[in-house]
Image: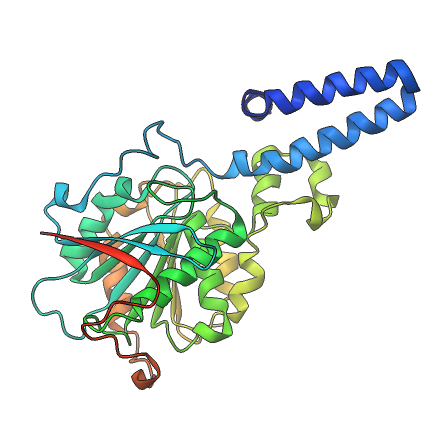
Amino acid sequence: MYHILRVILYRLWVVSTLTLFTSVVVFWWYGFFIAFTVFTLGITGILYGAQDLLLYYPNDPPDSRVFVLQPSNYKLPYESIKIKNKDGFKIHMFLIKQTTNIKHIPTMIFFHGNAGNMGQRLSNVSGFYHKLNINILMVEYRGYGLSEGSPSEHGLYNDAQTALDYILQRSDIDRSKIVIFGRSLGGAIAIDLASRLENRNKIWAVIVENTFTSIPDMAQIILKWKCLTWLPQICHKNKYMSLKKIGQVLTPTLIICGSEDMLVPPGMAKELYMRCGAIYKQIAVIPGGGHDDTWTCRDYYSSIQQFLLNVQPLPVDLNRFSDTTNKTPSIGHTIVLTV
């Protein structure tokens, strides 16, 4: 509780001071009840706006918005890509492609968690590249890393859709084997993307790791305020209602959770598994895995590999995708190829 108040006061001290000063002035001129109303409305607005500060940490560590580790540091061949989303912000991505046996291999779209940038996940992605023999498109949400804009729930959903639309324009990957992967907050984004009716025949498999049922559920667990049980949903600026949405996910789904996750209870993974609408679905509880280090555990990559081997081919007509061979995608982008 103390940490949360400290973060709010530190980051919103100007607004907090102005609210307090205004309340004092109103009290002096108009009396207690009007001043109390002004103070209550001001505090409510501050707490509502502060929810973004408590959920999104693009500046952790402090240089995360100016320095993004490159895949070349792990000797991975990649393209550095910037594309404009429909809101006009440039979104930064890395496309890491296999250099041999590139036909008919899956391409994973990787959605990271709520802190730092995608470069900090390259150790894990290197494992995907070498152990699973797949391509990976790493996505930097708006307001993270070198991407423009500020993070928001609706905005991050749009960024995910932008990434999917982009990769489906590529003619140099197997567009019938698109895998959506999300960790923690990224898992909620992956679930939203896969739950959309227009995407059901575009996504081959979904993998989520250490993700939650919803932000309101997480608020109750972290804050331990009983009053949050009766708090209307409208009071939550960010909701990420994954438990509600996952019933609309019909794509083969693997839900991974670390048995020692101290942030997101493993029980949430089981709830998501039970509610998932996919006919083929699996849950993998990784012994000893914490919230951020499950990917370092022994059975992690083998669990994903076995799941992907059992996913059936996607019955999709690739003619619906625009042929972009040797063409620049209609959504403006710049690419720097580095090997």
- Residue shown at the point (74%, 29%) measured from the top left: 42
- Residue shown at the point (89%, 26%) measured from the top left: 34
Q: Is residue 188 left or right of residue 96?
A: right
Residue 63 appears in which quarter of the rendering?
top left
Q: Is residue 106 left or right of residue 289?
A: left
User: Looking at the picture, does residue 36 appear above or below residue 86?
Assistant: above
Residue 134: image location, x then y, percent:
19, 63
Residue 110 appears in which quarter of the rendering?
bottom left
- Residue shown at the point (55%, 63%) measured from the top left: 245
User: Looking at the picture, does residue 154 appear above or below residue 180?
Assistant: above
Q: Is residue 31 visible?
A: no
Between 328 and 200, the one lying in front of the other is: 328
User: Looking at the picture, does residue 7 appear above or below residue 56?
Assistant: above
Residue 326: image location, x then y, percent:
18, 72
Q: Is residue 328 left or right of residue 232?
A: left
- Residue shown at the point (55%, 20%) measured from the top left: 10
